[in-house]
Amino acid sequence: MPTRSQTKSTAAFERARKVTPGGVNSPARAFGAVGGSPLFVARADGPHLYDVDGNKFLDYIGSWGPMILGHCHPKVVDAVLAAVRNGSSYGAPCELETELAELVVEAIPSVEMVRFVSSGTEATMSAIRLARGFTGRDLIVKFAGCYHGHVDSLLVSAGSSALTHGVPNSPGVPRGCTDDTLVLRFNDVAALKELFAARGDKIAGVILEPVVGNMGLVPPSAEFRTELRRLTQHHGALLIYDEVMTGFRLAYGGAQELLGDTPDITALGKIIGGGYPVGAYGGRADVMKKIMPAGPVFQAGTLSGNPVAMAAGIATLKELQASPPYQRFDALGARLEAGLRKAAADAGVPHQFNRIGSMWTLFFTPTPVTDFDTAKTADTKRFGRFFWEMMDRGVYLPCSQFEAAFLCAPMTEAHIDETIAAARDALKAIAAG
Ligand SMILES: *Cc1c(COP(=O)(O)O)cnc(C)c1O
């Protein structure tokens, strides 16, 4: 096995743990799901990360989605530097906000107006407030395994049983916060129909990741999407697509462009900020006009529409328009998929490979993964071993079985082949026991 020192990262982690809970500012970074201690990053460039010990990694996390152009894209860096020189925050409107809003409205036909916030969590939180304010109803429907940020009322888990009320899955979330959140199984058409038949006139909105990334990559069935749109429309509930991960990722216009869907509200984040803190929610103009000061639904933010972050988002979207990476992503993704499937089969490792374009997950299970229950059949211990074997071979994968990995624009066939070669060795090593 290649030798990789982690002395400095381990020391940095120990230092961080004394002053920051768990040593990290977001839990997934702590490698809890795979064991061991995390890398501390010194810098990043293109498709690569460099840790403080001087190791170089091919980066399949891309900051968990935003870095679709790779790290330090020169046009984004230039735009940010130019913006910083003009002042970093005004607390007053500036034209960069309108420019990014115009790009979003142009990219996503269902979005007629958009409001910028500073994170994906803020976007989904505000989107459900808007859905409730617009409809005058309280109930929100979500799906087990979909993650919408750390919004109190969306931090719920549920067993596989349909029609259960959500149970908070974090201490500190009062029962009352999740009482109006109903949790269904993803792709479960029968449960969806049953719920709408029973309580359709009380449902403010249905929120989902149209293509799920946060239980590992799980695509929606066509029937599920069709019924979601039909039932919400019929019962006057709003359909909310959380495209924080998939927006500008699966297609320039997001999952909804790829699938041909028209939600009422869309939540955005990640790529839209080009690596800076930006979230957004947008949708039908009549719905968006309920937001203050146009309407009565309150939502505000000191750093919302921050000019530096707007500049990074504008540069990122313009580059995605100028050189769309989506066809290349699909070709590279197919190459990676074929290589990893064959490597796993050759090693005799039961697996599923779910992929759409540049988003993918290799699940260690013989069961097709279509929802959270089937995702949970995966062998997470085996995934943990695979993760570290890949790390030792210079490939940085998401540190949990239940996360999607991402390609980025600067990746080439050579990078894909390097990854497949690493995976061949890694899978052989884990199959050997
Ligand atoms: C990342 C993510 C969020 C939360 O965004 P943050 O910027 O981390 O608050 C919400 N929804 C989805 C689908 C995500 O992937």
Image (cartoon, rainbow, N blue to C red):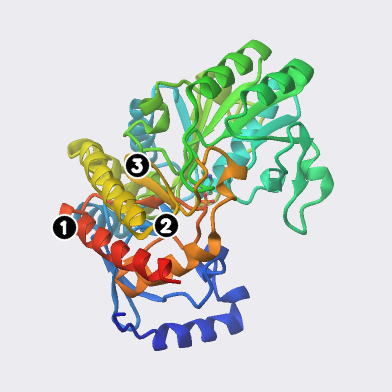
Identify the amino acid type marked 2.
Val
Image quarter of residue 82: bottom left
Total number of numbered labels?
3
Label 3: few (<14), some or many (≥20) within 10 Å?
some
Circle 1 SS class:
helix
Q: Nearer the viewer, residue 118 or 222?
A: 222
* Residue in the image at 55% along x and 41% along y: 123
Calculate the distance from the C-alpha at mark 3 to the C-alpha at mark 1.
38 Å
Q: Nearer the viewer, residue 150 or 332?
A: 332
Q: Position of residue 410 (x, y in %)?
A: 20, 54
User: Which of marks 1 and 3 precedes in the sequence?
Assistant: 3
* Residue in the image at 35% along x and 41% along y: 249
Q: Nearer the viewer, residue 378 or 195?
A: 378
Q: Position of residue 195 (x, y in %)?
A: 73, 23
**Quick check: is the Cβ at mark 2 less than 8 Å away from ligand 1?**
no
Identify the amino acid type marked 1.
Ala
Q: Which residue is mark 2?
A: 349
Q: Which mark is residue 96?
A: 3
Label 1: few (<14), some or many (≥20) within 10 Å?
few
Circle 3 SS class:
helix
Q: Which residue is mark 1?
A: 414
